[in-house]
Image (tube, rainbow, N blue to C red):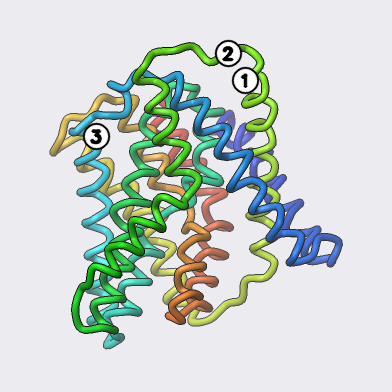
Amino acid sequence: MLDILLKTLPFFAILGLGFAAARMKFFGEQATTHLTKFVFYFALSAMIFRFTATLPLSEVFQPRSVLAYLSGTLFVYILVTVVALLRGIGIEEAAIEAQSGAIGNVGFLGIPMLVMLLGPSAIGPVMIVLVVDLVVFGSLLVVIVSAMRDGRMSLAVIGSIVVGLTKNPMIVAILLGLLWAAFAVPIPDPVNEFLILLGAAATPGALFAIGASLATKTTERIGVALWLSSAKLALHPLAVAVACFTLFDVSPFTAAVMISAAAMPTAGNVFILAQHYGIAPVRVSSTILVSTVVSILTLTLIIAAVSG
């Protein structure tokens, strides 16, 4: 475990540096926004494309792995929703709490950390997790909120979901990378060097941006934030582990990567959705802050356990 802790500490140190810079007003909110855009649209997309373009397609199209992660995440999603409804809150708030308890920061934190800790082979399982999170559960929230507010589903809602997915640079990078991989064409050396150089900025940039964004987060209903953080950091990886090993017989390495990805703290895009729809943004903000801080310990423990 000490070896893993020493390897994860630099990641959280950069995150802490971003937090300190924002707290001291050295790195403003507008600067954080622009850094996040650079990482999201350019650096991270370059990293994802390069990884997926060199992947054998068999490493991504694994039905058992997809079903294992999907079922484990769905279990936690439903559990958090039921607990929320039993507390007497509305369906929209229950849906945003379910997102907070089941969707992790796989793009900005998971990809760079797991590829560095578990090796380049981790990218295939991480892509599975990322696609399921973005396509299935990201769309699910939009469907639930739209159905509650409009009383029905419409073609306009479905169209907005499709447009939203096509505008997501991570989804686009994955699709283009898989298309390139399908033709089994080597990436030309100058292009490969360009992607390596640009993609290298993704890890420090993403971690710094996460830390800086945490400096603007506020706390509310800390008891709920602790419950949602527990669901994300403990119940989610446990549910994925059970699905991998008892229901779908996923290979040990793929299971290890997906369990580690499930242990990531709550994703920042959940806050963006909560703010966009006006559904408990401060509660989500609290969960992101708490889960990220606590994950310094829990993520280390889980990665150490599964990598063994």
Q: Residue at x 61, y 76 (%)?
A: 218
> Quadrant of residue 4 in the image?
top right
The answer for how far apart the CA atoms under marks 2 and 3 are is: 31 Å
> Quadrant of residue 179 in the image?
top left
Name the quarter where the C terminus is drawn: top left
Q: Which residue is mark 2?
A: 188
Across and down, in percent, residue 289 comes to: 57, 65
Across and down, in percent, residue 291 comes to: 51, 60
Q: Which mark is residue 65?
A: 3
What's the residue type where badge 1 is placed? Val
Q: Which residue is mark 1?
A: 191
The answer for how far apart the CA atoms under marks 2 and 1 are is: 5 Å
Does residue 112 appear to the left or right of 233 in the view shown?
A: right
Numbered disc 1: secondary structure: helix
Residue closer to the observer: 123 or 76: 123
Across and down, in percent, residue 16 comes to: 71, 53
The answer for how far apart the CA atoms under marks 3 and 1 are is: 31 Å
Q: Residue furthest bottom?
A: 88
Mark 3 vs 1, N-terminal side: 3
How many other residues sit within 10 Å of disc 3, few (<14), some (14-19) or many (≥20)? many
Q: Residue at x 64, y 53 (%)?
A: 37
Up/down of 21 relative to 81, above or below:
above
Does residue 274 appear to the left or right of 197 in the view shown?
A: left
Up/down of 289 relative to 245, above or below:
below
**Disc 2 vs disc 1: Cβ atoms closer than 8 Å?**
yes
Across and down, in percent, residue 149 comes to: 29, 84
Nearer the observer: mark 3 or 1; the answer is 1
Q: Residue at x 39, y 53 (%)?
A: 165
How many other residues sit within 10 Å of disc 1, few (<14), some (14-19) or many (≥20)? few
